[in-house]
Image (spheres, grey):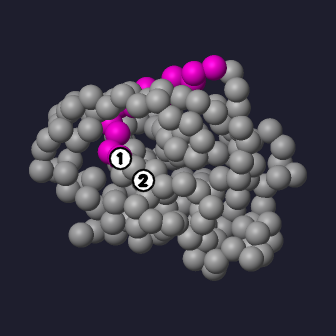
Amino acid sequence: MTIHEILKMGDERLLRIAQPVTEFDTDELHLLISSMFETMHAENGAGLAAPQIGVDLQLVIFGTNQINPRYPDAPLVPRTVLLNPVVTPLGPDEESDWEGCLSLPGLRGMVPRFSHIRYTGFDQYGDPVDRVVDGFHARVVQHECDHLIGKLYPMRMRDFTQFGFTEVLFPGLDAAADD
């Protein structure tokens, strides 16, 4: 499999609006998704968006089958492939929590997100995906889908006094959790 280089904040490709996926269940798409999961796991990520590896498609993957060293207290999220996603907030309630991003290694920020959402889209075979979620699952989906519209989590922050290096903010966190 291929481990991709993850684009870092400042790369203009992270600011583009991704294009819809128009062909499903192709060998090329399956290979891309497999390599994205390999890349995400190699970096201890909770999710990864295609634009983060320079692929201009509305494709995100996320999910954890085990405790993630970057988010040791987070609940497990089902492994998911989501193409052409639509995220709909289910009410105005928001929760703020710390987020990191593989495109901003070593940093964390306090980010408000909708507490309860519905997300729809398609899996790699073109079958519909439709889920209602909350908590960490909702946060991960919103974070990854933001990459498809050219947004990085600092663009959602409201208080930059709650933004800094992981090693300073969370000195006891495992060294593998620094991005």
Q: Secondary structure at mark 2?
A: loop
> As rendered, which of 75 and 120 lies closer to the eye?
75
Q: Are marks 2 and 1 in contact (CB under 8 Å)?
A: yes
Residue 63 shows which numbered tag? 2
Q: Position of residue 157 (x, y in %)?
A: 74, 41
Looking at the rendered structure, the kind of residue marked 2 is Gly
Q: Position of residue 143 (x, y in %)?
A: 55, 43
Splitting the image into 4 quarters, where does residue 126 fall? top left
- Label 1 crowd (10 A; few <14 / some 14-19 / many >=20): some
Image spot of residue 136 (x, y percent)? 58, 46
Given residues 60 and 62, the one toward you in this image is 62
Q: Is residue 41 shown above or below 86?
A: below
Q: Which residue is mark 1?
A: 80
Dot 1 falls on a residue whose secondary structure is strand
Which of 31 and 73 lies nearest the eye of the viewer?
A: 73
Q: Position of residue 81 (x, y in %)?
A: 32, 45
Range covered by the magenta-colored residues = 80-91
Q: CA distance from mark 2 to mark 1?
A: 6 Å
Residue 54 visible in rendering: no
Check if residue 71 falls in the magenta segment.
no
Q: Quadrant of residue 32?
A: bottom left
**Residue reaching furthest to the bottom:** 175
Q: Which mark is residue 153?
A: none
- Lower sequence index among marks 2 and 1: 2
Q: Is residue 5 left or right of residue 23?
A: right
Q: Quadrant of residue 21?
A: top left
Tell me which amino acid carries mark 1.
Answer: Thr
Left or right side of 31 for 101: right
Position of 122 with respect to 46 (left or right) is left
Dominant secondary structure (helix, strand or loop) of the stretch shown in magenta: strand
